[in-house]
Amino acid sequence: MKRQKIAAGNWKMHKTFEEGQGLAQEIRTMAATEVMPEAKLLIFPPYIHLQAIAKQLAGSGIGVGAQNINQNEQGAFTGEVSASMLKSIDIHYTLVGHSERRQYYNETNASCAAKIVTSIKHNIVPVYCIGETLAEREANAHFSIVEEQLSAMKGLSNEDAAKCILAYEPVWAIGTGVTASADQANEMHIHIRKCVANMFNDEIASGISILYGGSVKPDNAKSLFAMSDIDGALIGGAALASRDFIDIAKSF
């Protein structure tokens, strides 16, 4: 099965409502007029944008996702948003376990596992983020750390595992301007695919899309995407500029 090539933009906590609409429209216009035959575009704006941008991009082929999801169906969880709420405004993707959520909001592999299950139950595709800190890499623990994070998928059926997207984001490269070399990134992507094969089977592993995230820009995207096991990017800062985002998507 041919793996999907994906350019996913995580806007994080940026853009007012008007700015977000403007950026989404620029991306839609460029995507419609520039040749990107292999790329699936996804954007993950803050919650305030989701309903408006989902409507704005309807029919464009550009997917819209949430930056977070709550694992509970409903209840007294002030400030949280459920899967059914997201589905009610036509949202089909969500990030799970981004390193900033792990670092600042105490997300764990266990809570990520619950979010993955809830997402799939509601036909929302989880983009599950994994990656090591600089200290973990320097201690040569990066492979075991990522394998441990992948254990959040262990309870899934083969059918449900195949619905996931993975994103490898070395924490030391997020927003720092430092990028893992193409060889470093690919080495980890190969490891991730082997871990998925061990948890499920070779077919699931060969078909799952694994994105790289960590200071991806137009000038380094081509070298990353040329690697055997890198299927796209989860893009931070460069996703806030339509020209950069589209140029990355054209790098496959």
Image (spheres, grey):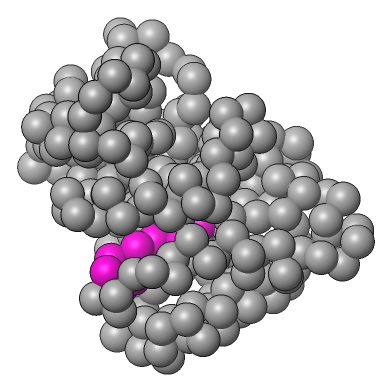
How far from the left and from the top, in percent, is residue 46? 38, 23
Residue 232 vertical position relative to residue 107 in the rendered view, above or below: below
User: Is residue 94 found left or right of 105 in the rendered image?
Assistant: left
Query: Which residue is outermost to the right?
Result: 139
Query: Which residue is outermost to the front?
Result: 76
User: Is residue 219 found left or right of 137 in the rendered image?
Assistant: left
Residue 21 vertical position relative to residue 86 in the rendered view, above or below: above
The residue at 21%/29% (across/down) is 74
The residue at 29%/26% (across/down) is 81
How far from the left and from the top, in percent, is residue 194? 56, 84
Residue 145 can be seen in this image: yes
Residue 5 can be seen in this image: no
Total numbered circles: 0
80, 22: nearer the viewer: 80
How far from the left and from the top, in percent, is residue 72? 29, 37
How far from the left and from the top, in percent, is residue 236? 54, 36
Residue 130 vertical position relative to residue 93 in the rendered view, above or below: below
Residue 8 vertical position relative to residue 2 in the rendered view, above or below: above
105, 28: nearer the viewer: 105
The quarter of the image holding the C terminus is bottom left
72, 245: nearer the viewer: 72
The quarter of the image holding the N terminus is bottom left
The residue at 49%/20% (across/down) is 13
The part of the image, by quadrant, that contains residue 201 is bottom left
Magenta highlight range? 160-167
